[in-house]
Image (tube, helix red, strand yellow):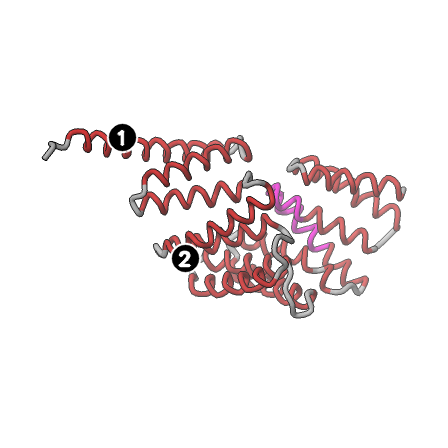
């Protein structure tokens, strides 16, 4: 039975790494069942896999199943007397579920709990868990129009990111947080600060995966919009073409993103052609 459990766990983690969420969820559910049979009752392994299953269900938008698994994981962690490191994952999943359902007050309370848990787990220092917790709360505030609170939380996340060893940790998390923070400045038309954060996000992606990622596509798209706003159409076109390529490689099923990138390319190309025609028509002096 232990061998079966280890096999299922390895397979669902492999499926998750490949982005195959349906297969990962199915294998994770089998891992939960195997851990229940192996240990015959509450056990750390059951809590661990229930927490993973809750998050997989949430990502698949199976919200009822996600909440049930997260609630059971938290209850079992309490029954076993486990510390907060076991509670942070399912608590964060529940916060995300509340946020998605528009229950911002409940989500805020749970996000604050995850921040406290992450900081305690890091012994007052910095970690990816702390960065993620502040990023999630900041996103909630930004999404609900509380920009000042969002900026404070993103700034706290950035402070913790700066304390992490360069080139280590969850590159996708780091870039997503920087993109989110940049988006806040972009909405205010503070293009200088926004550009700095987008470019830092791209630097991280370049080190981690040669800049081939959805996070890099987001940064290039918004840098293109900034360049377009500032009248630098050639630079905007460079960014939009890169956005289209990255969306085609990383997210070929996201037709809306691909179509949007193509529209941006067409719009800027037409504007550049119009500028060129006007230049040719100017009388010589």
Q: Which of the marked residues, 2 or 1, is nearer the chain's N terminus?
A: 2
- 250 on left or right of 86: left
| Image spot of residue 181 (x, y percent) | 47, 56
Q: Position of residue 119 (x, y in %)?
A: 64, 66
Magenta region includes residue 61: yes
- Quadrant assignment, res 82: bottom right
Q: Residue most toward the left?
A: 285
Q: Tell me which residue sits at (9%, 35%) in the image.
A: 285
Q: Nearer the viewer, residue 97 or 201?
A: 201
In the shown orientation, is residue 271 left or right of residue 13?
Answer: left
Other-residue count near label 2 (Cα within 10 Å), few / some / many at <14 / 14–19 / ≥20: some
**Left or right side of 233 for 223:** right
Which segment is the magenta one?
A: 55-72
Q: Residue at x 74, y 42 (%)?
A: 28
**Which residue occupies the foreground of this view, 173 or 109?**
173
Which residue bears the numbered disc 1? 273
The residue indicated by pointer 2 is: 193
The residue closer to the viewer here, 81 or 217, is 217
Residue at 59% x, 59% y is 131
Cα distance between the residues tagged 2 and 1:
31 Å
């Amino acid at each position: 039975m232990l061998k079966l459990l280890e096999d299922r766990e390895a397979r669902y983690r492999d499926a998750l790494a490949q982005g195959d969420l349906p297969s990962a969820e199915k294998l994770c559910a089998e891992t939960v069942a195997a851990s229940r049979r192996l240990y015959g009752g509450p056990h750390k392994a059951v809590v661990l896999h229930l927490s993973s299953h809750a998050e997989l269900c949430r990502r698949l938008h199976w919200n009822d199943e996600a909440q049930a698994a997260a609630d059971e994981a938290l209850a079992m962690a309490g029954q076993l007397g486990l510390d907060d490191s076991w509670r942070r994952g399912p608590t964060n999943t529940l916060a995300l579920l509340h946020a998605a359902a528009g229950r911002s007050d409940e989500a805020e309370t749970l996000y604050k709990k995850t921040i406290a848990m992450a900081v305690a787990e890091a012994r007052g220092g910095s970690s990816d868990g702390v960065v993620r917790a502040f990023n999630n709360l900041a996103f909630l505030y930004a999404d609900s129009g509380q920009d000042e609170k969002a900026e404070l939380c993103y700034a706290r996340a950035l402070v913790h990111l700066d304390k992490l060893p360069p080139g280590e940790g969850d590159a996708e998390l780091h870039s997503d947080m920087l993109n989110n923070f940049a988006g806040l400045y972009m909405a205010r038309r503070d293009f200088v600060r926004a550009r700095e954060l987008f470019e830092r996000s791209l630097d991280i992606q370049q080190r981690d995966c040669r800049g081939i990622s959805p996070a890099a596509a987001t940064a290039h798209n918004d840098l293109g919009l900034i360049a377009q706003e500032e009248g630098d159409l050639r630079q905007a076109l460079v960014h939009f073409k890169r956005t289209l390529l990255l969306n085609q490689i990383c997210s070929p099923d996201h037709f809306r993103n691909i179509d949007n990138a193509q529209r941006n390319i067409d719009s800027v190309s037409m504007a550049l052609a119009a500028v060129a025609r006007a230049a040719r028509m100017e009388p010589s002096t």
